[in-house]
Image: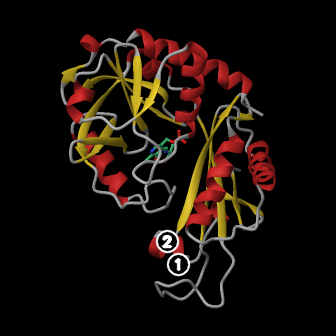
Amino acid sequence: MTKVFINGEFLDEKDAKVSYEDRGYVFGDGIYEYIRVYEGKLFTVKEHFERFLRSADEIGLDLGYTVDELIDLVRQLLHQNNVKNGGIYIQATRGVAPRNHSFPIPSVKPVIMAFTKSYDRPYEDLDKGVFGVTTEDIRWLRCDIKSLNLLGNVLAKEYAVKYNATEAIQHRGETVTEGASSNVYAIKDGVIYTHPINNYILNGITRRVIKWVTDDYNIPFIEETFTVDFLKNADEVIISSTSAEVMPIIKLDGENINKGKVGPITRQLQEGFKKYIESHSI
Ligand code: PDD
């Protein structure tokens, strides 16, 4: 039986229930992380939990866990569910209290929940690339917080599905921000461009790994905003996330990128990324 972690207990899936008054359920008042598992090991897990604690801090939530305790928790769940390749989802909400927008007084304990998923790396998509569409970014102004409020992202992703694309690439006015669940990069004349880290995007952990790879390969990594038009005229376009890794976009709004083929810098980044899987999984 698959186990789910809820508030200190590893429960059978069928017994894993939360209250109707959980503030995550009622308000989306909480935060989450999604961590990748390769060959039974956690990839860049410290970075993920440092971001988790930062998100908690930004919404005034005291989780009562350290990074090491969180690593220990998810590792136990991983073993119980015997996950070899896949991922772990973990979320924390502000807890259970009568519905009232402001924080509960007295404060209640956060509800922490985690579950696992088993699946392989997306080999075929990594090899062939996927399609993207562009859409206006209608989200709030704290996209740096990995919050449970994902309605803007959900609607963007559904827009992508409607147009047979894998990812919706969002833009505020002319400025490209990020994907519905990924960071976005334009590669032009051997230089890689991506949105700077600020409140308009999530500080992706995969983005960080890509930055390490560009350092290794001496590829200039420019953290500056660019326009939709620049992206459409790029030599190569990629998105990155914990589940998508370094994913090529070969068609954007129905127009080919690099004649619909995965480009050479994308291949280098994928190659370099693979090395980090080996060196940064514990
Ligand atoms: N999403 N931007 C957004 C809006 C995201 O939702 C994600 C990841 C990223 C990439 O972050 P990272 O490289 O740390 O995974 C960027 C995860 C995978 C999710 O929602 O499941």
Which label is found at residue 39?
none
In this picture, is 8 found above or below 264?
below
Q: As shown in the figure, which amino acid type bears the numbered disc 2?
A: Tyr
- Residue at 70% x, 32% y is 84
Q: Secondary structure at mark 2?
A: helix
Disc 1 from disc 2: Cα separation = 7 Å
Q: Is residue 111 left or right of residue 144?
A: right
* Residue topped by disc 1: 20
Residue 160 x, y percent position in the rendering = 27, 40
Q: Secondary structure at mark 1?
A: loop
* Residue topped by disc 2: 25
Residue 60 x, y percent position in the rendering = 60, 72
Q: Is residue 240 in view? A: yes
Q: As shown in the figure, which amino acid type bears the numbered disc 1?
A: Tyr
Q: Is mark 1 within 8 Å of ligand 1?
A: no
Q: Is residue 120 in view? A: no
Asked whether disc 1 touches disc 2, contact meaning CB atoms under 8 Å apart, the reply is yes
Residue 57 x, y percent position in the rendering = 62, 65
- Residue at 30% x, 44% y is 170
Classify residue 14 by image quadrant: bottom right
